[in-house]
Image: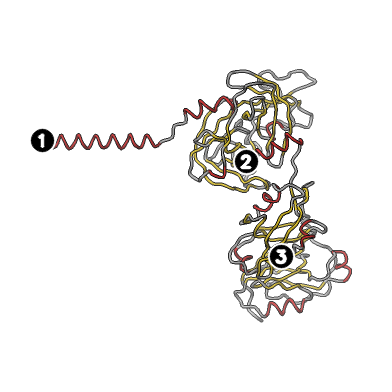
Amino acid sequence: MRAVRSLAGLWLAAFCLSVFAQARELPDFTRLVEEQGGAVVNISTTQAVRRSALPQVPGMEDDEVMEFFRRFVPRQPPGQGPGQGQGPGRPESRSLGSGFILSNDGYILTNAHVVDGADEINVKLTDKREFKAKVIGADKRTDVALIKIEGASLPVVKFGDPNRLKVGEWVVAIGSPFGFENTVTAGIVSAKGRSLPQENFVPFIQTDVAINPGNSGGPLFNMRGEVVGINSQIYSRTGGFMGLSFAIPIDVAIDIQKQLREKGRVARGRIGVVIQEVTRDLATSFGLDRARGALVNSVEKGSPADKAGIEATDIIVSFDGKAVESSSDLPRLVGSTRPGSQSTLEVWRKGATKKLSLTVAELQEERVAASSAPRGKPQAEVPANRLGIVVSELSAEQKKGLSLTSGIVVTDVRPDSKADVRKGDVLLTMVHKGQHTELKSVEQFNKLLAGLDKNAVITLQIRRGESVAFVTISGLADKG
């Protein structure tokens, strides 16, 4: 009996030690919050409501089908909330956000959408001091803003290296969700380098940290108490947290704020190409070892890319020695390059790599390619080919109007066709096993198709309106 009690005691002791060891492995955020929480601020803004303005209520603008990436600033409609103008001539709306202090003289980082259109910006510290702030500069493309309050000996954050973050690592957010100041939430890094729709210049940090309206512009800390990101967006059907949060890497934000402080604006590089993602089928068609790089659809005439000799159908696989794994990598790399810099890039062209150099220009405005199809009556039709499409040759007038020297036009697409083309598309080039063939006539094109295996994978370069793209087709109809 004594032996049994002894064994039971040993088992209980081992169990307690195991529980204690597991408890020690759980993160403790108390010291981080005590040391860094004072540098996190609450930001409130007021804006006179123009007649065209409508109150923005989180969740009310949801599309029934698509989920949205949301920039999350809670807004109170006119006449709701303390301290708002009630007079008939100047109703006001108020929004809330977060930020953090960079320097002890009062420079603060936040999101551009937090202060966008604000007539008045108020900053509140954890010690209840309040300041009026002015905007030094804001960059909508990265959603970063730099504001300034008049203070001295203010608490400041310290910065970390987001490139050292590892997926699965604990991170902490401090902010003001729904106006609840200095709220602390924690989670892990879910992914790095995320690309979001319409966000070409930021490789977002994805986390599962609980982020809600009012957290916008607040810091994301690593376990060393260093800021590694700015909480900016959530992925949600409802407007509230659903487990997917996105932060701007702090190195991106620091570079932006430095330019805003020095020049009041951000200068970005551009090289003058329209690109698309390289799929597995495209890689096979171009003879590339795997799906990587950015496929050049078209090159702007007179642009740095044009002067450097970059051609449509080139696949850019590296820029300034940095690999371009996805097409979304290229805008970031080029955009972060100072205009006027000499850069080198490597392209995959007709089965071989080629190095080119160019001088980066400055991005002035966003270019959006048109998607309308070319109009005009085609010449006599020919029977559908192995792609299930009918093609016709362009007239001299059409070629002149489109500034083309070759190409054939699609005049009909059968319902059972596998080709992702439309009536009116102009086919410019066919790529098969890395071989590029310029399409000059219907007869030439159909002969090329006739000589291919049924399971062949080909890529067509098409002109659609003012835009150029590549479509990949896997499998052809049996030979007639």
Report if residue 354 is visible in the image: yes
Q: Secondary structure at mark 2?
A: helix
Q: Mark 2 or 1 closer to N-term?
A: 1
Amino acid carrying label 1: it is Met
User: Which residue sits at x=79%, y=46%?
Assistant: 364
Task: Out of 476 and 399, give the one closest to the viewer.
Answer: 399
Instruction: Give the x, y percent position of residue 295.
Output: 68, 61
Q: Give the quadrant of the N terminus.
A: top left
User: Which residue sits at x=74%, y=76%?
Assistant: 445
Q: Which residue is mark 3?
A: 313
Q: Is residue 258 above or below residue 382?
A: above
In the image, 161: left or right of 442?
left
Q: Secondary structure at mark 3?
A: loop
Q: Is residue 162 above or below residue 297?
A: above
**Marks 2,1: beta carbons within 8 A:** no
Q: Which mark is residue 1?
A: 1
User: Which residue sits at x=58%, y=19%?
Assistant: 127
Report if residue 416 is visible in the image: no
Figure quadrant of residue 318: bottom right
Q: Which residue is mark 2?
A: 251
Figure quadrant of residue 237: top right
- In 3D space, how far apart are the residues under numbered discs 1 and 3 (Cα atoms)? 84 Å
Instruction: Determine crowd level at label 1: few under 14, some 14-19, many 20+ residues with C-alpha closer than 10 A.
Output: few
Q: Mark 2 or 3 closer to N-term?
A: 2
Instruction: Give the x, y percent position of residue 423.
Output: 76, 65
Amino acid carrying label 3: it is Thr
Count of residue discs: 3
Task: Out of 361 and 300, give the one closest to the viewer.
Answer: 361
Q: Is residue 151 above or below residue 7?
A: above
Amino acid carrying label 2: it is Asp
Q: Give the quadrant of the C terminus.
A: bottom right
